[in-house]
Image (cartoon, rainbow, N blue to C red):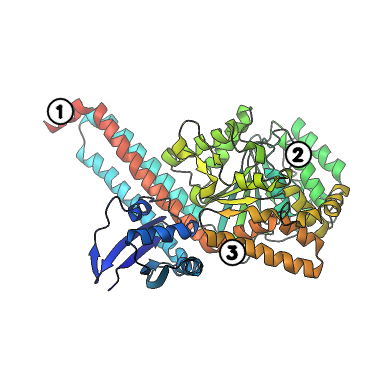
C-alpha cells in the first residue's frame, strides 16, 4: 500500500502541519525533510502562494512515489483552492496527486467568532493573574514591581480589547503606502474613478486620508479636526457647494477654508472635494487624519472597504514621518498595498517603512498588518518600454538594510503591474468627468496598450510561486479583455490593459474569501504578542528585583 500524506492547513494561524501515514500508522517526519521546512513557516504559510514546486517537494519527500494521496484538513474555501492547485499540477506532470477533504474546519467567519472568545478568555486570564499578584505579594519591598507588572497587564488587556472591537466591523482596511511619486494617490483616484486626492511630484500627502463609503451614494462629507475642534463639511446638492458646521469657532484657518469653499461653488462635486483636500493638506491647523466619505466602487453586499492614503515613506519632514507611523500603527486588520515606481524599488524610503513594520511586528500589539497577505504594485509600468525590464522586476527585493531576513522578495508576493494614470483616463471618460488630458490618454494609448508584448501590463503579474494562481488571474483579464473588444468598449479596454482591472478584481475576491482570516490573525497576533511581551517584562523585572524576591522567599 502506498504511503499517504495528511495535511492540516490553518488559514487564520497561517501554518501547515504534515503527517506521513503508512498502513494508517504515522511515520516520523525528519527535521531535515523538506516537509519540515514548510511546517517551520508558522505565521507565514499562505497556501495559495505555493505552486508546482510545493508538490515536487512533497514527491521528493516520498522517495520517488509517483502517486500520492493527500488527506486534507482545512476549510471548504481553502480546499477548493487546493483542489484547483492539484488539478493544475497534474495536467503538467507525470506524477499525480489525489486530494481528499477528510475533515472540514469551520469557515473563517465561524473561526473568527471562536477566536474572539479566545481573545476574551486571554483577557480574563490576565485579569485573574493580576488579582493574584495583589493577594500573594503584600510585602512593601516588591510593591513597585507588582504595580509595574499590573500596569503592563492592563495595557495588554486594553490592546486585545481594542483589537476585538475594531475587527467586529464588516470592513477590510486597504492601507496604501510607498515612497513619494510612486503614484499612490493616482492609483486610489483610479480605483475611485474620480480624481479627488492631491497628486504631485513632491511629497504631497502630508496628512493621512481615510476614505469610507456613504450609506447614501449622494452623501459626500469631509471630516477633520481644526486643532481640537471637530469639523464636518457636507455636500449640498441643491446649492452645489459644501457647507461647514456652523458651530465652528472663527479663526484665520476657518476663514481661509470658507473662502476656498466659496470660490469653488458651482463646480463639479469631485473637483470641489479635490481642491478642498489640497487646501486642508497644507493647513498646519488641520490635524493629521482627514476622513472623506465618498463612494468606493469596490464595495459589495458582503464586504466594505476602508481606504487609507498615507504620506510618502521617504519624506524628509518629521511631521510626515510621524503621520505615516500613526497611520500604520492604527491598522488593526489591514491589507497593506505597497506601491512602488519601477525606479524606486530600493531606497531610503522603502527601508524606513520596512524598519517600522519590523518594529511593529515585534513589539506593537496594536498594529496587525498581514504582510503575508499584502499586495505589491509596480505602478507607472508604461515607463518601462522593454518587457524584459518588467520581468526582471518580478525577482527584485525591497530591502531592509539592517536586516536582510526581513527584506521582501517580490517573487514571494502577489505582484501587480499598473499604469494608474492610463487606467484613470478610462474611468474618467466612463464617469463623464474626463479632462482634455484624460481624453487624449484614451485616444493615444488605446491601440498601443493592447499590444501583447509592450502593453497589457497585467500579463507581467505574478502570485508568489503559484503558477496556477498567476495563470488564473491573467486568464480572467484575458477573458475580460476579449469581451470588451467584442463590445467595442474602449474605456473597459483601457482599464483592463492598464492592469487596474486585475488589481481591483483581486482586492474584491480577497475581501470576500479571506477577510475573516485577516481579522482572526489580527486577534491571534495580539494575544501572542501580549503574552510574549509580558513574559519578557516578567523576566526583566525578576532580574532587576532578585534581591527583594529572595527576601520575600526567605
* SS of the residue under disc 3: helix
- Identify the residue under disc 3: 472
Residue 529 lies left or right of residue 260; in this view the side is left
User: Marks 1 and 2, how far apart in space?
Assistant: 64 Å
Count of picture labels? 3
Nearer-N-terminus badge (3/1) = 3
**Which label sits on residue 551?**
1
Q: Are marks 1 and 2 in contact (CB under 8 Å)?
A: no
Q: From the image, state whether disc 2 or disc 3 is nearer to you.
A: 3
Residue 92, horizontal then vertical, whole percent: 50, 66
Q: Give the residue pinned by disc 2.
A: 278
Viewer-closest of 293 and 464: 464
Observer able to see residue 407: yes
Give SS at disc 1. helix
Question: Between tags 1 and 2, which lies in front?
Answer: 2
* Quarter assignment of residue 479: bottom right
Q: Nearer the viewer, residue 266 or 337?
A: 337
Mark 2–mark 3 distance (CA, rounded to whole Å): 40 Å
Whether 202 is drawn above or below 167: the answer is: above
Amino acid at each position: 500500500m502506498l504511503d499517504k500524506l495528511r495535511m492540516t492547513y490553518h488559514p487564520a494561524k497561517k501554518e501547515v502541519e504534515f503527517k506521513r501515514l503508512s498502513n494508517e500508522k504515522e511515520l516520523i517526519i525528519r527535521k531535515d525533510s523538506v516537509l519540515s521546512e514548510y511546517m517551520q513557516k508558522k505565521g507565514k504559510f499562505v497556501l495559495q502562494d505555493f505552486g508546482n514546486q510545493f508538490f515536487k517537494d512533497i514527491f521528493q519527500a516520498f522517495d520517488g512515489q509517483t502517486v500520492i494521496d493527500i488527506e486534507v484538513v482545512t476549510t471548504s474555501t481553502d480546499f477548493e483552492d487546493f483542489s484547483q492547485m492539484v488539478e493544475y499540477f497534474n495536467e503538467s506532470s507525470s506524477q499525480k496527486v489525489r486530494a481528499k477533504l477528510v475533515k472540514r474546519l469551520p469557515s473563517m467567519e465561524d473561526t473568527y467568532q471562536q477566536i474572539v472568545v479566545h481573545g476574551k478568555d486571554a483577557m480574563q486570564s490576565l485579569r485573574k493573574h493580576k488579582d493574584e499578584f495583589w493577594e500573594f505579594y503584600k510585602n512593601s519591598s516588591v510593591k513597585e514591581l507588582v504595580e509595574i507588572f499590573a500596569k503592563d497587564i492592563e495595557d495588554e488587556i486594553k490592546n486585545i480589547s481594542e483589537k476585538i472591537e475594531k475587527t467586529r466591523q464588516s470592513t477590510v482596511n486597504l492601507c496604501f503606502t510607498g515612497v513619494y511619486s510612486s503614484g499612490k494617490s493616482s492609483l486610489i483616484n483610479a480605483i475611485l474613478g474620480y480624481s479627488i486626492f492631491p497628486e504631485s511630484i513632491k511629497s504631497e500627502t502630508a496628512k493621512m486620508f481615510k476614505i469610507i463609503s456613504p450609506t447614501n451614494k449622494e452623501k459626500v462629507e469631509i471630516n477633520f479636526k481644526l486643532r481640537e475642534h471637530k469639523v464636518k463639511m457636507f455636500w449640498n446638492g441643491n446649492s452645489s457647494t459644501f457647507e461647514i458646521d456652523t458651530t465652528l469657532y472663527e479663526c484665520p484657518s476657518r476663514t481661509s477654508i470658507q473662502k476656498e469653499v466659496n470660490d469653488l461653488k458651482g463646480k463639479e462635486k469631485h473637483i470641489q472635494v479635490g481642491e478642498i483636500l489640497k487646501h486642508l493638506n497644507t493647513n498646519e491647523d488641520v490635524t493629521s487624519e482627514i476622513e472623506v466619505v465618498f463612494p468606493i466602487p469596490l464595495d459589495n453586499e458582503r464586504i466594505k472597504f476602508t481606504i487609507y492614503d498615507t504620506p510618502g515613506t521617504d519624506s524628509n519632514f518629521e511631521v510626515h514621518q510621524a503621520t505615516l507611523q500613526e497611520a500604520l500603527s492604527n491598522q488593526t486588520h489591514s491589507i497593506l498595498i505597497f506601491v512602488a515606481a519601477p525606479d524606486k524599488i530600493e531606497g531610503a524610503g522603502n527601508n524606513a517603512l520596512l524598519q517600522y513594520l519590523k518594529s511593529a511586528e515585534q513589539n506593537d500589539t496594536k498594529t496587525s498588518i498581514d504582510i503575508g497577505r499584502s499586495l505589491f504594485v509596480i505602478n507607472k509600468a508604461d515607463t518601462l518600454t522593454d518587457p524584459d525590464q518588467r520581468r526582471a522586476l518580478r525577482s527584485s527585493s525591497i530591502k531592509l538594510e539592517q536586516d536582510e531576513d526581513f527584506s521582501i522578495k517580490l517573487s514571494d508576493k502577489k505582484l501587480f503591474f499598473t499604469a494608474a494614470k492610463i487606467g484613470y483616463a478610462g474611468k474618467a471618460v466612463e464617469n463623464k468627468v474626463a479632462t482634455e488630458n484624460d481624453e487624449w490618454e484614451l485616444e493615444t494609448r488605446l491601440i498601443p496598450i493592447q499590444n501583447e508584448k509592450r502593453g497589457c501590463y497585467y500579463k507581467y503579474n505574478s502570485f508568489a510561486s503559484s503558477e496556477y494562481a498567476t495563470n488564473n488571474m491573467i486568464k480572467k483579464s484575458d477573458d475580460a479583455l476579449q469581451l470588451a473588444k467584442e463590445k467595442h468598449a474602449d474605456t473597459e479596454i483601457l482599464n483592463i490593459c492598464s492592469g487596474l482591472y486585475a488589481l481591483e478584481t483581486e482586492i474584491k475576491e480577497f475581501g470576500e474569501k479571506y477577510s475573516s482570516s485577516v481579522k482572526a490573525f489580527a486577534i491571534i497576533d495580539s494575544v501572542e504578542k501580549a503574552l510574549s511581551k509580558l513574559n519578557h517584562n516578567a523576566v526583566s523585572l525578576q532580574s532587576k528585583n532578585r534581591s527583594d524576591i529572595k527576601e520575600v522567599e526567605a
